[in-house]
Every structure is written in C-alpha cells, then in structure tokens.
Image (cartoon, rainbow, N blue to C red):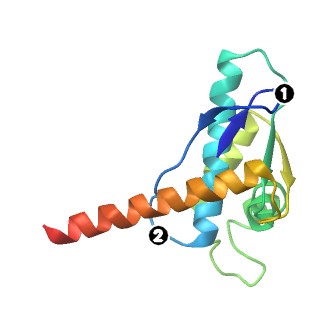
Amino acid sequence: MEYFSNNQSYPLISIWGPVPGERTNQRAELYALYRAIHAAVYIRSKVQTTCTKIYSDSQYSIDCALNWVKKWKSNGWKTTTGKDVLHKDLIQAIDGLLQECPVSIQHVPAHTGIPGNEKVDVLAKRGSGEQQERQEMHAQF
C-alpha cells in the first residue's frame, strides 16, 4: 500500500509486511485494505484533509467493506447459506475504521500498468517473501 500526495508524484508512505493469521489471497487483500484505511486515519490526524481515496484491485475486499458487511451484521455474521463469514475479524476491523474515518474506495483493474497498482503488487510480493523467510527461520529452530 502506498499513500500519495495530492499531486500523485511521489509516495509519502509505503507499507508492506506479512499477513497475520491464515495466509490466503482474500485475507491478504482484506489486510491490505485494513492497513490502507488505518494509514488514512493516521494521516488525517496529522494533515488537514477531508477527502481520502483508496484504490484497490480487489473487488472482493471492496464488496466486503462496503456492501456485504451491512447484511452480515444484521444476520449475526452469517452468509446467505448460514455459514460463518470468512475473515470476520478483518472485516469487522475495516468496518470500525470506516465508521471512524469514511473514505472513498475505488476499484482498479489489476496488472494493467497502473503505476500505483503495479508498485503495490511488488510490495505484496515483498511482504509474502518476508513471511516465507520467517517461517523458514522458525522451522530451523
């Protein structure tokens, strides 16, 4: 995740790292969105801004955060088939942050040459590599 200034010419913050808990693509996408919103809350506390836009190539994460969460909350965190909602902990955390700091979240297509999106892909791979390195180190002891 990167935060860009208004002129979009340079990143002010780059964040990457391993995903806590189970490592799945959906959980990683949700965690990235959580970290982006968390950073927006922090930035708003330091800089006078009223508009924050987050771009994500994960339609799943956007739907979880903006659409499906309302129904899940009213259904006791059950899906329409009665199963427990996956990644409920992250979705609840995202929802809490959005209540505190509403942001605009816009979908962008993945792997289409959008500079910020391509950079985030590099950061995600870096974070994934760190997770693998930590697991390998831990397994040696």
* Residue 38 in sight here: yes
Q: Is residue 106 left or right of residue 28?
A: right
- Based on the displayed image, in which of its 4 quarters is residue 11 positioned? top right
99 w.r.t. 86: above or below: above
Observer-nearest of 82 and 92: 92
28 w.r.t. 38: above or below: below
* Residue at image location 70% in from the left, 48% down from the top: 95
| Closer mark to the observer between disc 1 and disc 2 | 1
Per the image, label 2 sits on a secondary structure element best described as loop
Residue 126 is situated, as x and y percent measured from the top left of the image, at 50, 57
* Residue at image location 40% in from the left, 62% down from the top: 131
Q: Is residue 120 left or right of residue 106?
A: left
Distance between the alpha carbons at the discs numbered 1 and 2: 37 Å
Q: Where is the C terminus found, in terms of image quarters? A: bottom left
Residue 77 is situated, as x and y percent measured from the top left of the image, at 67, 66
* Residue 92 in sight here: no
Residue 90 is situated, as x and y percent measured from the top left of the image, at 59, 56
Q: Give the label on residue 42, or none.
A: none
* Residue at image location 69% in from the left, 33% down from the top: 40
Observer-nearest of 5 and 19: 5
Q: Is residue 51 left or right of residue 4?
A: right
* Residue at image location 53% in from the left, 48% down from the top: 16
Marks 1 and 2: CB-CB under 8 Å?
A: no
Query: Disc 1 designates what residue?
Result: 7
Per the image, label 1 sits on a secondary structure element best described as loop
User: Which residue type carries mark 1?
Assistant: Asn
Query: Disc 2 designates what residue?
Result: 22
